[in-house]
Amino acid sequence: MDVFDSFIKHNISPSIVKAPTKLLTVEYDYDYEYENGVSVQIGKELKPNRIQYKPKVSYTADKDAFYTLCFIDPDLENKEHQFKNPVKHWLVVNIPGNDVEAGEVITDYIGHELSVKITSEAFEASIKYDLHRYIFLLFKQQDKIDASDEIRDTEYSHKERNNWNFHSFIFKYRLGQPVAGNFFLCRYTGEILSD
């Protein structure tokens, strides 16, 4: 199944965002504690301990263009209330070409377990254990953007992570439709990972 069809099958498109046609390559644990990394297979389930650290994201890019990468969870509250309260797990803007590390980080990366730890008051235990859709989206910017008024979120802050107005952000910076994407499923295991 291709990217477009997978986004539709898992009710990401059109309810959350228009489906991209290109796949983002996302690899976890590529240089951390595991000898072998884990590549995100679109729509497949991953265990929380495999997504604890920031992944390597790669894609074919226009070397003269800037890109925005976001990683979101629209299922914090309840799948019935789609995208009213998405969690912003990672946000990088002004990425030159495909050099994600050279981009401007607005929101530091957090994995699933840490997200549960810092947002546990926001949802009931009965919801925590459901599968969540974790979505990577890549947007091609029209030009370099001035994001100086955006509040920065560090690893352990969550003030601007919950209830993130994704659509307003996309509109504000004229990002349009995503040019590439990927997603996986994950559920809380009941254990909080330690640093």
Image (tube, rainbow, N blue to C red):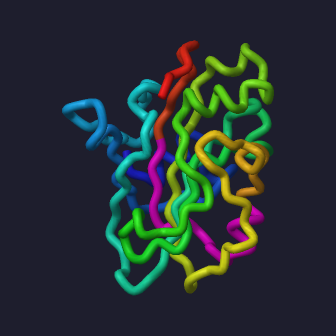
In the image, residue 179 lies in the stretch drawn in magenta: yes
Residue 68: image quadrant is bottom right
Q: Position of residue 180 (x, y in %)?
A: 45, 62
Q: Residue at x 77, y 65 (%)?
A: 168
In the rendered image, which quarter is residue 30 located in? top left
Q: Position of residue 190 (x, y in %)?
A: 58, 13
Q: Where's residue 143, x and y in %?
A: 56, 85
Residue 189 in view: yes
194 vs 28, left or right, is right
State the residue at coordinates (72%, 31%).
119
Identity of the residue furthest to the left in this view: 35
- Residue 43 placement, left or right of 36: right
Looking at the image, which is closer to me, 56 or 8?
56
Residue span colored magenta: 167-183
Q: Quadrant of the N terminus?
A: top left
Front-most of residues 80 and 105 = 105
Residue depicted at x 20% and y 32%: 35
Q: Tell whether position 38 is magenta.
A: no
Viewer can see residue 79: no
Q: Is residue 6 above or below residue 58?
A: above
Q: Residue furthest front?
A: 195
Q: Residue at x 38, y 56 (%)?
A: 23
Number of labels in the image equals 0
